């Protein structure tokens, strides 16, 4: 927990600063932590989610 976050987490947090749906989903993950496994823990899932949300 004290190490710097992995690159995919930094990408997610950066996107949350620009895309409201990403910010909402990240914040709502603290109410429903089970959702984090769908977009937060694995770099591939994070990349797929960000591509979906950004329309890339």
Image (cartoon, grey):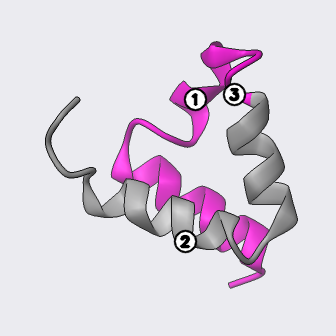
Q: Position of residue 38 (x, y in %)?
A: 59, 33
Residue at x 68% of width, y 22% of height:
30
Neighbor class of circle 2 (other Cα within 10 Å; few <14, some 14-19, many 20+) is few
Q: Is 43 displayed left or right of 45 in the figure? A: left
- Main structural element of the magenta stretch: helix, strand or loop? helix
Question: Is the N terminus in the top left, top right, bottom left or bottom right quadrant?
Answer: top left
Characterize the local packing of mark 1: few (<14), some (14-19) or many (20 or more) Cα atoms within 10 angstroms: some
The answer to if 37 sits in the magenta stretch is yes
Which residue is labeled 1 in the image? 36
Element at label 2: helix
Q: Measured from the top left, where is residue 16 in percent x and y?
A: 67, 63
**Image marks 3 and 2: residues in contact by CB distance under 8 Å:** no
Give whichever of discs 3 and 2 has the lower sequence position. Answer: 2
Disc nearest the viewer among 2 and 1:
2
* Secondary structure type for disc 3: loop
Residue occupying the far left of the picture: 3
The span picked out in magenta is 29-56
Q: Is residue 25 above or below residue 44?
A: above
Which residue carries the number 2 mark?
Answer: 14
Question: Is residue 6 a member of the stretch shown in magenta?
Answer: no
Give the residue drawn at x 14%, y 42%: 3
Callout in the foreground (1, 3):
3
50 relative position to 55: left or right:
left
Whether residue 43 is situated above or below residue 25 in the rendered picture: below
Q: Residue at x 53, y 60 (%)?
A: 12
Residue under label 3, please give it: 29
Structural distance between the alpha carbons of marks 3 and 2: 16 Å
């Amino acid at each position: 927990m004290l190490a710097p976050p992995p690159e995919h987490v930094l990408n997610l947090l950066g996107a949350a600063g620009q895309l409201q749906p990403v910010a909402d989903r990240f914040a709502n993950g603290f109410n429903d932590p089970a959702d984090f496994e769908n977009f937060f823990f694995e770099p591939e899932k994070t990349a797929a989610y960000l591509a979906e949300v950004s329309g890339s």
